[in-house]
Every structure is written in C-alpha cells, then in structure tokens.
C-alpha cells in the first residue's frame, strides 16, 4: 500500500467533506495494520488544517466547515476501536464540555464549535441546548474536563455565562477549568466581565484559542 | 380618465406559487408540525387532525386547512385609540410600523448601542407619534429598567400612555397576555369594543423547523378568542433552520404559518390572522441572519405573494438594516426593503428605525425612515392621469415663451404629484457648504430633538390612564415586583 497516497486521499476526503470516503479510508488503514496514531497525524489532521486555511482565506463557508468536521468525525469513529485496542490513545488536545446556556435554545453556533473542536482533536461532550448551569459543572467533574464552553445567542441569557463562572467559584472549582464563552452577543470584553478565560468570534477561531490555551495548561 | 395602475411586483409565477402551497400542505399532512401546547393539541385532535400526544406531533390534513382558510377574514380594519381613524389591513394597502422588540437603542451622541430604559421607550413612542408615514406604533423597544418577567406588558403600557396609533406587539410569557389584553380593552372601552375595533396586532413566531412553542401557541389561542389579530411570523434561516433554496424555505413557511392559522381558527372561527414572517438569508460566513440581504427581501416578497393568493392579509419585516449605525448600508438596505415591500403590497411592514439584525432601534433612523416610507407611499400611488386631455389643452396656442412655473396647472398639481423631502439634500453645493455641510443624519438628529421638545401629541386622558396604571401595577405585584419607574407623563 502506498501510504503517502493513502494519506493524501484522507486529507482530500476531509477537505471535500466526504464522510463516507473518510470513513472508508480509515477502515482500509485499520485492515492494513497501519500505525493508527500516524494515520491520524499524517492523513486526517492535515485535512482539517487545510479546511481552516480555506476558511480563513474566505473560500470555505459554514456548510463546508461542518461537512469537513463531520467527515473527521466519521474517520475518527472508524479508527477509535483500533486505537483503543492497541492501547494507544489518539492524542487529544483536551476534554471539552460544551452547551448552550439555560434559557436559550439556539444551538447552531454551538454545534459548529463542538464539531470543529472535535475535528481539531478535542474530546467533546455536547450537552445540547438550554443546559442548566449545574449540568455543565457536574458533567465537567464527571469526565474530568479541561474546558467548559458556554454558548448564548440572546443578550437576556448571556448573563447566565457570568453566573456559571460565579457558581464555579462558589464551589471552589474555578481554577480547575478553562471557561470559554461564545455566541452572537458575546465579546472579548464580555468574557473579561464574566470572568471567563476566553472568547472567540467563530468556530475556527475557537479551535485556535482552545489549542493555545491547552498548550499553556499542559 | 384611465384608471391608475398600482405598480406591483410578483416574484413567483402562478404555477410556482401554487406548487409551493401544495408542497406546504403536503408537508403538514405527511410530516406534520410539533405543537407544544396541550389545548392546541386537543383542539386539533377534535377537528380531526392526527395528533400524537407523546411526541406532540400533529399531522394536519389539507381539507382542515382549506376549511380554516375559508373562515379566516380576507382583511382586517385596525382602529386608532379614538376609534375613529381606520386602517385597512388587506388588499394592497401598506402600513409601515417600527421594527419591534429591539433590546437596545443606538445612542446618537455616543454612537454606541446601549440598553433602553423607560425614558427611551417614552421618547420612542412620542417620536413615532409625530411621524406621519409610520401608520402603526410597535412596542419597538424592551425596557431594561423593569424585570424581564413583566417587560412585555410594560412596553405596551408605556405605549398606550403615549400613543394613539394602532399597535403591533406580542407576549414574551404566557402570563403577559392577560394584562396586555386588559389594558387594550380598558383603552378601547371594553372587550366587545376591542373585538369590534382592534387596537393591536399580536406577533406569534413558530420555531423553525415546523414547531409551535407553548408560548406562541397560547398567544394564538388567547388572541383569537379576544378577537385580537395574530401575525404569524415564520422565520426560516436558509440553510440553517430551513432549506437553503428560497423555494424550499417558502414551502416550510407556508406549512408553519398555515398550522398557526388552523390553531387560530379552531380557537375561534373567524379569528383575524395575518400571514407574516421574518425569514432570512443565513450568512454562511458569519452565521448571522441579515434582514438587509436582497435574498431575504425576495423570500419576504414571495411569501407575501403566496399570502395574497390565499386571500390573507400580509406582513413582513422589511425596511430595516443590519448596519450598526446610520450609514450608507442602513440607507441602502432600508430603502430597498421599503420599496420592495411597498411594490409587493405587503399590508403591515415592520422595520423602520431598526438596525443590527432586529436588535437595535435608533430615533434618528426612525426620522430618516419616515422619509423613506413617504417615498414608498408615493411610489405605489403610481402615475395617474390627472386631467382630460392630459396636456393638449395646456399647449393650445403654444409660443416659445410659454411659462410653466406661472401656469395655473402647475399650482394645481405639483403638490399632488411631487413630495418634498425634509432630509434629502437638494441644495446647490455652495448653499450646502454655507449651511454647515450637514448630512441627512445631522438633520435627522435635529428633527428628533425638535419633535421631542414639543408638547406630547397624544397623552392618554386621565381616566383611562388611571385604569392602565391600576392594571399594570396589579400585574407587576402579582409577579412579585413592587414600584415601577415613573412613566414620563
């Protein structure tokens, strides 16, 4: 098997947002007994990196972004059993608990960030929309998360992002987690005011921010 | 005299419009809608719709929809506070009203958005009251100085204290309906009078795709029973909460709105309903919902065409902008929307004053937009044959020194044929420089100050005011809140 050719195809599958192809190629890699961490690193990760570049160049839009993230998910799902069996965990950048804050049912932006974080190598636990503050914390405690990412679309629910940080402080858990806020009304200034650790204006920027903060956590 | 043609645009061929309606009806029949309201589910079940109580999914057959369309009035007459001035909402009549429920106000001095308070709402209502081309008021701002739980009723309360125009409003909570209806009835002189002469339209938005929430469904039911017109505001976002194609979004729009219409009719036959909406062309770069996008306006015009085909009064969110300040973008998007809405014959056009994706109101923009609305009304009045013959008799005995300016024909017609704008600059360059190089925005701000400096136009008379205060205070107390801000009288 031509490994380089396979890796190029994998990259291409991600760039094209072709989930079926990305999954199928992952299956081939497993059957061929390739070193799966290398498959991830050299095959798929360059694909999602390329997608980020295309986004930043203004060539890719949200539908392409989400299709590529889904393709990445399909590839990882096919590789996961093999990775676990071999005892080699795919290197994750960190564990993320994400959701849209209580009182808010808007989850398009949140879904996108969740998908991109996952595609970017994070272990993502998506709690959905209208998530009670306590649930964010309970889940983060349960899975040993590094990040809590909170989305809000409404100015009326955005205040709950601040309440979440306050609740973490109350429980003496504030320093344990990196809290990121996002959503239409959020801003860098708001992140500071809410006592969060960061804000990103879109899904690609969110992955960058999380990676940056993760490397500082490590 | 030859009849004047009202200029009009239609985006859809009759065949395409019918196909969209047909697919919408099939969608309601086959996939149905989710209705998160027990009473509506009961009403729908009793009327023969296939209700799955566990999933709250309802499949509505087309015969029920057709029957409900028959019982829905083709037009509605709204009345101002005095009950004397009537506005027909139907046919190709158009009525502009400010874009509603903004959460912030653009502060002209700071050129920054900020939260609005009681004082701002009072200014807003008093200003709109003076704007002749904005026929209806809307509860256009949400007051941040009262608890959110009573904010829906409170904004209508302030509005009724300061304005005589008909209102476009709506509930934020199920509990909000009762005090709002009571206040309207108090102003009108009883519930029967309110039913006879509607003073306010209530907006109700389904949640795309294909869902009616408990709150909005209850609003439909309550409004229908009180004889208050419900404005159905379907709002698919292309490629995000509805199909990416304009026609695909229209099919869903039809299904959602017609489900709402059926609920209204089942609550009370003959209930007034407006086929409205606030869909948008979803921006695939920013993930936002631009109301100023040309495709958004195309969807609006097209669903309104369908609404007319179904013989219903229509509404749209047009004549507004996504700009953050009053700049070139705000002018372009607002004027384009106003003109397209007027040419589409949309009966209730909500938009003036609004910026930043329906989230911000600007007093200066209201004044600018009033001028735009004036142009739109002029535009749809069309080109009329004023005299018979048109011109020949005026040219009789024509000589080279013919004077148009002094001809009696000029004084007879120029004011009817031409409107004189207040803000558009028509000065020669030197005069403009001498006058201080003012922009339309400068002039608009001066106009705001001038209008707000004058005595209030329509304060509510003492007796009715006392009634409103009592209702509002009682509602605030029932929700656990004490003193309300001074209402600026």
Image (spheres, grey):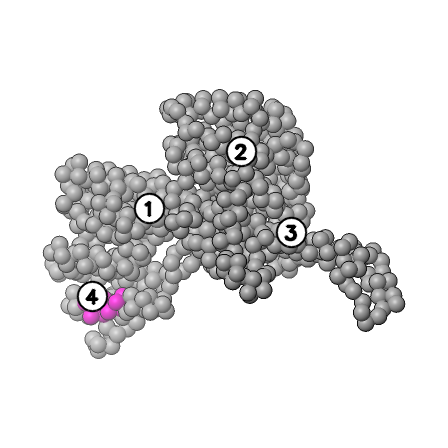
Mark closer to the observer (3, 4): 3
Residue drawn 26% across and 74% down?
Answer: A8
Mark closer to the observer (4, 2): 2
In primary-sequence order, the first of circles 2 and 3 is 2
Tell me the tag on residue A193.
none
Near-viewer residue (A200 or B62):
A200
Q: Which residue is mark 3?
A: B377
Callout 1: chain:
A
Q: Which residue is mark 4?
A: A40
Q: Quadrant of residue A74?
A: bottom left
Callout 2: chain:
B
Q: Position of residue B306 (x, y in %)?
A: 61, 51
Q: Is residue A27 above or below residue A158?
A: below
Predominant secondary structure, magenta span: helix
Q: Which residue is mark 1?
A: A152
Q: CA distance from mark 4 to mark 1?
A: 33 Å
Mark 3, secondary structure of its residue:
helix
Q: CA distance from mark 3 to mark 4?
A: 63 Å
In primary-sequence order, the first of circles 4 and 1 is 4
Q: Residues within 10 Å of mark 2 (few under 14, many from 20)?
A: many
- Are dots 4 and 2 on a single chain? no
- Are dots 2 and 1 on a single chain? no
Callout 4: chain:
A
Q: Residues within 10 Å of mark 3 (few under 14, many from 20)?
A: many
């Amino acid at each position: 098997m031509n490994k380089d050719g396979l890796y190029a195809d994998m990259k291409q599958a991600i760039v094209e947002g072709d989930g079926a192809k990305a999954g199928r190629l992952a299956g081939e890699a497993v059957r061929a007994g390739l070193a799966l961490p290398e498959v991830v690193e050299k095959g798929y990760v360059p694909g999602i990196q390329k997608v980020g570049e295309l986004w930043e160049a203004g060539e890719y839009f949200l539908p392409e972004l989400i299709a590529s993230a889904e393709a990445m998910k399909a590839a990882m799902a096919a590789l996961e059993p093999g990775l676990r069996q071999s005892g080699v965990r795919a290197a994750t950048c960190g564990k993320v608990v994400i959701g849209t804050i209580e009182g808010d049912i808007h989850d398009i932006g949140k879904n996108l960030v969740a998908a991109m974080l996952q595609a970017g190598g994070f272990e993502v636990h998506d709690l959905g929309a209208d998530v009670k503050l306590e649930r964010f914390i309970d889940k983060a405690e349960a899975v040993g998360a590094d990040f809590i990412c909170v989305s809000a679309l409404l100015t009326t629910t955005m205040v709950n992002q601040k309440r979440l940080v306050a609740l973490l402080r109350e429980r003496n858990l504030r320093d344990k987690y990196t809290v990121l806020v996002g959503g239409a009304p959020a801003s860098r200034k708001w992140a500071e005011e809410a006592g969060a650790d960061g804000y990103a204006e879109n899904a690609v920027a969110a992955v960058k921010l999380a990676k940056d903060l993760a490397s500082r956590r490590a | 005299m030859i009849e004047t043609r009202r200029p009009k645009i239609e985006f859809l061929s009759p065949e395409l419009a019918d196909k969209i309606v047909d697919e919408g009806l099939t969608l309601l029949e086959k996939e149905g809608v989710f209705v998160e309201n027990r009473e509506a589910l009961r009403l729908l079940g009793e009327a023969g719709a296939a209700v799955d109580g566990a999933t709250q999914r309802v499949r509505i057959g087309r015969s029920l929809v057709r029957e409900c369309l028959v019982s829905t009035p083709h037009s509605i007459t709204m009345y101002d506070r005095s009950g004397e001035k009537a506005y027909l909402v139907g046919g190709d009549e158009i009525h502009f009203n400010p874009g509603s429920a903004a959460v912030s106000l653009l502060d002209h001095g700071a050129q920054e958005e900020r939260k609005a308070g009681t004082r701002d709402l009072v200014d807003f209502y008093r200003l709109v009251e003076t704007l002749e081309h904005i026929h209806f008021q809307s509860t256009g701002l949400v007051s941040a100085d009262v608890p959110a739980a009573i904010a829906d009723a409170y904004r209508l309360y302030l509005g009724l204290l300061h304005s005589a125009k008909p209102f476009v409003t709506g509930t934020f909570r199920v509990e909000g309906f009762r005090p709002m209806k009571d206040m309207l009835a108090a102003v009108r002189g009883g519930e029967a009078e309110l039913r006879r002469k509607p003073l306010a339209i209530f907006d109700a938005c389904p949640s795309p795709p294909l869902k009616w929430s408990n709150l909005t469904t209850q609003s439909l039911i309550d409004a229908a029973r009180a004889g208050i017109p419900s404005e159905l505001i379907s709002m698919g976002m292309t490629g995000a909460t509805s199909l990416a194609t304009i026609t695909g979004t229209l099919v869903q729009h039809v299904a959602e709105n017609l489900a709402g219409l059926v609920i209204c009719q089942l609550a009370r036959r003959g209930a007034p309903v407006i086929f409205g909406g606030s869909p948008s062309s979803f921006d695939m770069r920013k993930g936002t919902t631009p109301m100023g996008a040309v495709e958004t306006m195309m969807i609006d015009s097209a669903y309104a065409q369908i609404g007319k085909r179904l013989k219903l009064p229509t509404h749209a969110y047009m004549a507004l902008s996504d700009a953050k300040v009053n700049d070139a973008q705000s002018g372009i998007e607002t004027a384009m929307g106003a003109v397209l809405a007027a040419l589409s014959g949309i009966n209730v056009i909500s938009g003036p004053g609004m910026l930043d994706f329906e989230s911000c109101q600007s007093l200066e923009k209201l004044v600018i937009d009033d001028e735009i609305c004036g142009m739109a009304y002029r535009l749809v009045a069309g080109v009329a044959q004023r005299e018979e013959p048109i011109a020949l008799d005026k040219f009789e005995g024509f000589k080279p020194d013919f004077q148009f300016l002094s001809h009696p024909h000029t004084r007879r017609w120029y004011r009817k044929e031409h409107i004189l704008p207040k803000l558009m600059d028509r000065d020669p360059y030197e005069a403009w420089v001498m006058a201080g190089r003012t922009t339309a925005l400068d002039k608009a701000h001066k106009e705001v100050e001038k209008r707000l400096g004058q005595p209030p136009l329509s304060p509510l008379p003492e007796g009715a005011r006392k009634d409103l205060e009592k209702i509002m205070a009682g509602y605030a107390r029932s929700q656990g809140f004490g003193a309300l801000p001074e209402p600026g009288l």
